[in-house]
Image (cartoon, grey):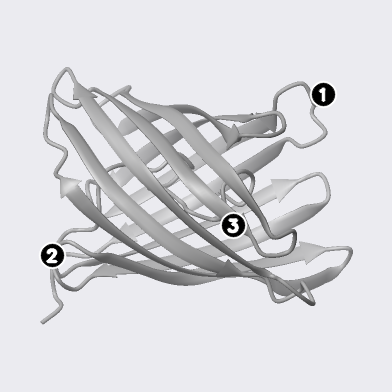
Amino acid sequence: MALAAGTAHAARPMITDDARIVDAKACQLESWVKDDRDSTEYWALPACNFTGNLELTLGGARTREGGHTRTTDVQVQGKTLFKLLEPNGWGLGLAAGTVQRPQVSSGGRDWYAYVPASFSFRDDAVVIHANVGWLREGETRRDRLTWGLGTEARLGTRTWLITETFGQDQGRSYAQVGVRHWLLPDRVQIDTTYGNRFGNNGEERWFSLGLRLLSPPFLP
């Protein structure tokens, strides 16, 4: 989401968020590598649900660029649900957080909030996600409207096709397509994506490869 709307990440590999959270008393780790023309980002976002309806995330990214690797993003986020997503139904939530960028000497902290909505069809064979939100850019001190629209489509018992577009109220939007596969259902997932900015002739294209781990409930 650093591309278009802060750094609010959905369940890998989507950037458009879903109206879901980690199971009560359980945790997850989402990690991935994102490679573009000029840099390589290494992300890790651990998250836990201590109360049953509040998912807390604390993590960030290190970026290799110009032969140097440094911490470029530190993210804290909370997410809750107003309506649980069920098969052939819909869900609604709210997420808010902040991203600190240590490499920015002044005003390197962004604030954001957004509403994720999800709609299930054909017993969860197709799920559509829509986001609308707000981003306060610390460096420019400007407020932005953010948005996203994405789809998950089941290709097999363990494999999903991901397509989405997202952006802000200014500038060209982005698009991404990818595949998610469960090595161990609901516990170990791998994924890969390709993305680009519309009308940019590949100048901002990227590839990503991710690993997602989910635990059973274990927290007190």
**Circle nearer the N terminus (1, 3):** 3
Query: Which residue is located at x 77 percent, y 37 percent?
Result: 204
**Residue 213 shows which numbered tag?**
none
Q: Is residue 77 above or below residue 2?
A: below
Q: Is residue 201 above or below residue 76?
A: above
Does 128 sit left or right of 44 as displayed? left
- Observer-nearest residue: 210 or 174? 174
Q: Secondary structure at mark 2?
A: loop
- Tag in front: 3 or 2: 3
- Residues at marks 3 and 2 touching, judged by CB atoms closer than 8 Å: no
Does 24 sit left or right of 70 as displayed? left
Spatial distance from mark 1 to mark 2, Cα to Cα? 45 Å
Q: Which residue is mark 3?
A: 136
Image spot of residue 190 (x, y percent): 42, 47
Q: Which residue is mark 2?
A: 52
Kind of residue at disc 3: Arg
**Residue 201 shows which numbered tag?**
1
- Tag in front: 1 or 3: 3
Does 146 sit left or right of 197 as displayed? left
Placement of the C terminus among the 4 image quadrants: bottom left
Spatial distance from mark 1 to mark 3, Cα to Cα? 29 Å
